[in-house]
């Protein structure tokens, strides 16, 4: 009988540990989008210059690492031709409260923040459409990016539209998850 208070205290302590704050649906959804970019990927980047219709396809590698504070650090390696490899590092963060996707680079400089359409119905796989504004050749443009997240594969295509124009292809990543 004298062990009963000790067992009761232990049971209460275990119950308290198990009752940590559970993520909301939007927080879980945002985390699943970010997790899709974690890992090693290889594929292609098809790119069109902002003032030309000429497209170039080149190999690309991507390494995505989850950050402790949330978000994903993405290291891109592009074949720049002539045996040169260009490397860039960006961060991707999905904010469940504002339902936006933010890309940063050069440390913490925000490059773009765009609204995620149909955020509430996204299941972690499938298409995700993101809209916002950016600049090309120092001119403002509307941006529409379609992300397709599937088991072992990520593609995303960015289309841009200058004022008074129509959306046109800008670039497309096609990436397959690599086994270590």
Image: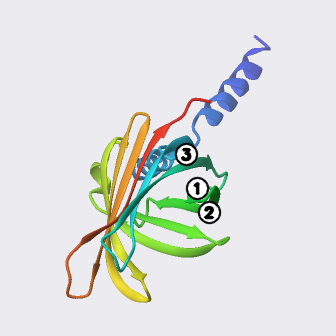
* 42 on left or right of 147: right
- Asked if the residue under mark 1 is in contact with the one under mark 2, i.e. CB atoms within 8 Å, the reply is yes
* Discs 2/3, front: 2
Q: Label 3, label 1: how many angstroms apart (C-alpha)?
A: 35 Å
Image spot of residue 133 (x, y percent): 36, 78
Q: Label 2, label 1: how many angstroms apart (C-alpha)?
A: 5 Å
From the image, tell me which residue sits under label 2.
88
Residue appearing at x 50%, y 47% in the figure: 37
* 93 on left or right of 56: right
Q: Residues within 10 Å of mark 3 (few under 14, many from 20)?
A: few
Residue appearing at x 30%, y 71% in the figure: 53
From the image, tell me which residue sits under label 1.
76
Q: Identify the mark nearer the N-term, 2 or 1.
A: 1
Image spot of residue 166 (x, y percent): 19, 77
* Of residues 162 and 69, the one drawn nearer to the viewer in this rendering: 162
Residue appearing at x 60%, y 47% in the figure: 63
Q: Is residue 71 visible?
A: no
Judged from the image, the secondary structure of the residue bearing numbered disc 1 is: strand
Q: Identify the mark nearer the N-term, 3 or 1.
A: 3
* Of residues 78 and 156, the one drawn nearer to the viewer in this rendering: 78
Q: Which of the numbered marks, if any, corresponds to residue 21? A: 3
- Which quarter of the picture shows residue 178? top right
Q: Identify the mark nearer the N-term, 2 or 3.
A: 3
Image spot of residue 130 (x, y percent): 33, 63
- Which quarter of the picture shows residue 54? bottom left
Q: Is residue 41 visible?
A: yes
């Amino acid at each position: 009988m004298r062990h009963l208070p000790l067992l009761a205290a232990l049971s209460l302590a275990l119950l308290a540990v198990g009752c940590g704050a559970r993520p909301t649906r939007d927080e879980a959804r945002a985390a699943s989008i970010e997790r899709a970019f974690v890992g090693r990927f290889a594929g292609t980047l098809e790119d069109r210059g902002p003032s030309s219709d000429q497209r170039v396809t080149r190999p690309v590698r991507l390494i995505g690492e989850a950050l402790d504070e949330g978000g994903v650090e993405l290291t891109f390696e592009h074949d720049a031709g002539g045996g040169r490899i260009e490397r860039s590092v960006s961060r991707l963060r999905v904010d469940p409260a504002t339902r936006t996707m933010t890309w940063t680079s050069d440390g913490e400089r925000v490059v773009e923040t765009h609204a995620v359409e149909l955020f509430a119905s996204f299941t972690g796989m499938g298409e995700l459409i993101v809209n916002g504004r950016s600049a090309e050749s120092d001119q403002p443009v509307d941006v529409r990016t379609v992300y397709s997240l599937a088991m072992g594969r990520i593609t995303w295509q960015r289309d841009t539209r200058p004022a008074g124009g129509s959306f046109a292809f800008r670039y497309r990543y096609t990436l397959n998850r690599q086994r270590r």
